[in-house]
Image (tube, grey):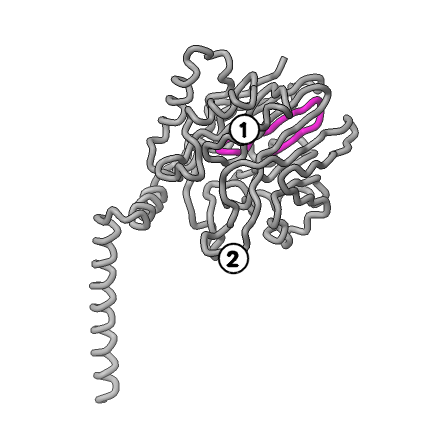
Amino acid sequence: MFVTATRRKFLKLSAAGGGALAGVSGFWVATSQRRIARWLRTIIADSRRSVQPAPVKPNPAAWPDNAVTICWLGHATTLINFYGIRILLDPVFFTRVGIDVLIGTAGPKRYIAPALSIRELPPIDVILLSHAHMDHMDLPSLSRFPKQTFTVTAAKTTDIVQGLNFQNLHEMRWNDKQIFKGRQGDLEIEAVEVRHWGKRFPNEKIDRGYNGLILRREGKTLLIGGDTANTPLFAAMRSKGPFDAAIMPIGAYNPWIRSHCTPEEAVAMANAAGARYIVPIHHSTFKLSDEPMTEPLERVKQALHREPERLTVQRVGETFTLT
């Protein structure tokens, strides 16, 4: 009887203590201005928020194979038909990005759904992975593609996708080149240096790579900025052009200015490289930083207000065809 009574008392005290701890923790999460607390508030609020459909629905089946067509599917995910070769940049298609846990993925939730689901994509010839961050190298998305897909990734990152059994995986360091040979012809892929960081987790000991990319085919050249902070490296790329278009990141700069450029800096770097058109990506999809969700697009439009014809896709799902 004494043991039973003591056990009941212990359980009551434990429950009371746990409730008090939960209360203190809940108050801290609700009121603290520490970044981890603000991140937790965002995650909690996200659970009640619905994902909005993409404003534009593209139709890749109607795209010509004798042109270069670029479609922004959301965040950094971009679909390109490069004279009949279908290329997918940094595929991320699920509701959240982050760490896989038993009940799903713990991380930021989309504001806007992808313009196409994986099932709605055309057959993909080439997958390009700029670096190992979870909003660019998303394992649940990658697991849905055929294992023989020609896939390019940055230095010291292939171990992350080993469990997916990709059979045609090419790790590239800066200035490396790969040639994809397809039924429609060849595509040259060159990795170039940008200013970012590559670790999948901040406390990793592996110094993983991160790439910008240059694509060449049939006399057309595309520049992909990857994730990058402001850097003079784009001026050095000018000799590798001329670039018909630059696909540039414009979001997640506040407070991450050391690894992500502002919209004005994205335009300046594309100009330094000599790009004719600018395709803005990496904005409006996930809340990864403190600037308002609509700010990056507003600022890039202002930066190009004297040359509005150079700014191409602005809404998820919009398509641009090079002429």
Please give the range of residues in magenta: 74-88
Kindly report which numbered mark, 2 or 1, lies closer to the viewer in this rendering. Answer: 1
User: Which residue corresponds to the image point at 50% horizontal and 11% vertical from the top-left?
Assistant: 309
> How would you rate the neighbour count of disc 2 (Cα within 10 Å): few for under 14, some for 14-19, many for 20 or more?
few
Compared to residue 121, the image places residue 6 above or below, namely: below
Real-space Cα separation, disc 2 to disc 1, in angstroms: 28 Å
Per the picture, the main secondary structure of the magenta-coloured stretch is strand
Q: Viewer-proximal residue, 193 or 124?
A: 193
Q: Viewer-proximal residue, 233 or 165?
A: 233
The quadrant in which the N terminus is found is bottom left
Which secondary structure lies at badge 2?
loop
User: Which residue corresponds to the image point at 44% horizontal and 39% vertical from the top-left?
Assistant: 259
Q: Is residue 135 left or right of residue 21?
A: right
User: Which residue corresponds to the image point at 36% horizontal and 26% vertical from the top-left?
Assistant: 295
Which secondary structure lies at badge 1?
helix
Q: Earlier in the sequence, mark 2 or mark 1?
A: 2
Please name the amino acid that badge 2 sits on: Lys
Q: Which image quadrant for residue 171? A: top right
Q: Is residue 2 left or right of residue 132?
A: left
User: Which residue corresponds to the image point at 23% horizontal and 49% vertical from the top-left?
Assistant: 32
Compared to residue 2, the image places residue 109 above or below, namely: above
Residue 47 part of the magenta-drawn span: no
Residue labelled with disc 2: 205
Residue 80 part of the magenta-drawn span: yes
Q: How far from the left and from the top, in percent, is residue 57?
A: 53, 23
Tell me the number on the disc at residue 234: 1
Q: How far from the left and from the top, in percent, is residue 119?
A: 61, 35
